[in-house]
Image (cartoon, rainbow, N blue to C red):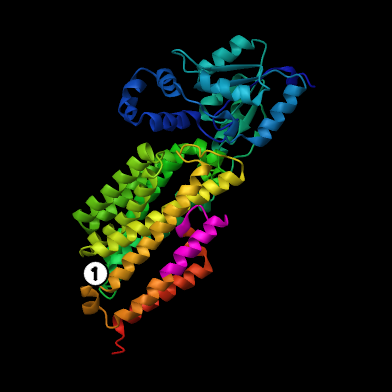
Amino acid sequence: MSSANVLPLFVDLDHTLIHSDTLIESLFLHLKREPFHLLLLPFWLLRGRAYLKARLAEGIDIDAAHLPYHKELCDDLRRQAEGGRPIYLATASHKCIADQVAAHLGFFSGVLATEGTRNLKSRQKLAAIRALAPEGFDYAGDSRADLPIWQAASQAIVVGASPALLEQARRKARVAKVYPRRSVGLLTYVKAIRAYQWLKNLLVFVPLLTAFRFTDSDAVAAAVMAFFAISLAASANYLINDLLDLQSDRRHPRKRRRPFASGAVPVAQGLLLAPLLLAGGLGLAALVSWPLLAAVAIYVAVTSVYSFALKGYFLVDTLLLAGLYTIRILIGSVAIGVAASFWILAFSMFLFLSLALVKRCSELKLLAQNSVLQAKGRDYRAADLDVLYPMGIASGFLAVQVFALYINAADVAARYQTPEALWAVCVGLLYWVGRMWFKTGRGEMHDDPLVFAIKDRTSQITILLMVAASLFAYFVDIG
């Protein structure tokens, strides 16, 4: 071991040892438990960043085992620690969080972190390091706040810094090693805002189709604007939802690969993107009409209540999910100025409750296959499948029954040239609902059944045939 390497090495936590920010993670963990504390945040910050961090860290289990660690750096640190080098965790995160990380990794000689009234950042961190290592030290960090520490260190290790910051570090310090910044492509951000989920928002076009106004250019334009308004607002909610669910997502076999859970996209960027997307969605809705703005705002309010308060309650969450699908249809009705019928609302509520239960059953089945008996963050157990399966199947076939009754309604005979052709739609629905549940029972269902349906060739053909049957019933008179 060279003379430089016998010096103790101090390592930052956020965006250095891990690809995340524990302050923002603790903020969302805290707000998930105490959402009304959002109003207290400015007052806590006025008392200092150390006080804010202490309040946010109260009673928080950061789940150090599942944090997105910088694997290459951790491997290097472990090898050096096994070779006898003292390695310390030196972070501005609160000490109770830093202690959990150090205990999990097991190779740190000690921890320097924020506690009491001292926010251990930049020059305050440098003073604490010098007090512990007066004869010299090396330091690994990632941010502009680390420049004074790098300058004082014998050797600087730069992790994930921008080219401009790396150049500054090279001018001020002896940079011994650079861990390159992770590249984040456009596709990663598209995944982060879950743009594929925008497919669900095609439901806003249902009133346009059922009212047969797809030749009305004004109505089409209003529906398109409504689609993008609710899509942007929904993406804002997905971002917040993913930030709230970081810990449970990291324990999930598939969701752990989501951009925020995996650390591919910094959580701070999610905190910035969410309000921008929300503002864009509400702004587009306002351009169409004030009633549409109110409808999209109601959607945002319901999704917020779901995310912050009710998603952990069994059955309540599925009923809300079904309601959110139905609200999408109502938004389409508001956009083009037509009243949503009793039939379409009843049909959508039963059908989407069935699909929400498909989602829960597929998640529980996957957990059961991995010998996990309790869903993290949700009040469901693998044993609940015995009850959820019949509930979901019954709800799906109730939707088919509503459609069958609709065929015999008085206004159908007046609106459709050949209403008897709608029975083909009824048969298609029976097949499609049954197939979705068979796929769920076999463990072949995607986390999101609508995404599965859009990608599944059989579902595509079935839905197209049902649409064709509906158009035939409306336009063709076989008299």
Whether residue 191 is situated above or below residue 63 in the rendered picture = below
Name the foreground residue: 336 vs 160: 336
Residue 122 in view, yes or no: no
Determine the image quadrant of residue 116: top left
Quadrant position of the N terminus in the picture? top right
Residue 315 horizontal/vertical position (percent): 39, 45
Determine the image quadrant of residue 414: bottom left
Q: Which residue lies furthest to the bottom in this view?
A: 479
Residue at 74 percent of width and 25 percent of height: 80
Residue 282 horizontal/vertical position (percent): 28, 50
Which SS type dominates the magenta stretch? helix
Was residue 66 drawn as part of the magenta stretch in this picture?
A: no
Was residue 445 drawn as part of the magenta stretch in this picture?
A: yes
Quadrant position of the C terminus in the picture? bottom left
Residue 473 in view, yes or no: yes
Whether residue 41 is situated above or below residue 339 in the rendered picture = above
Residue at 52 percent of width and 46 percent of height: 364
Part of the protein shown in magenta: 429-450
Which residue does the numbered mark 1 point to in the structure image? 218
Determine the image quadrant of residue 325: bottom left
Residue 98 horizontal/vertical position (percent): 55, 22
How many numbered marks, from 0 up?
A: 1
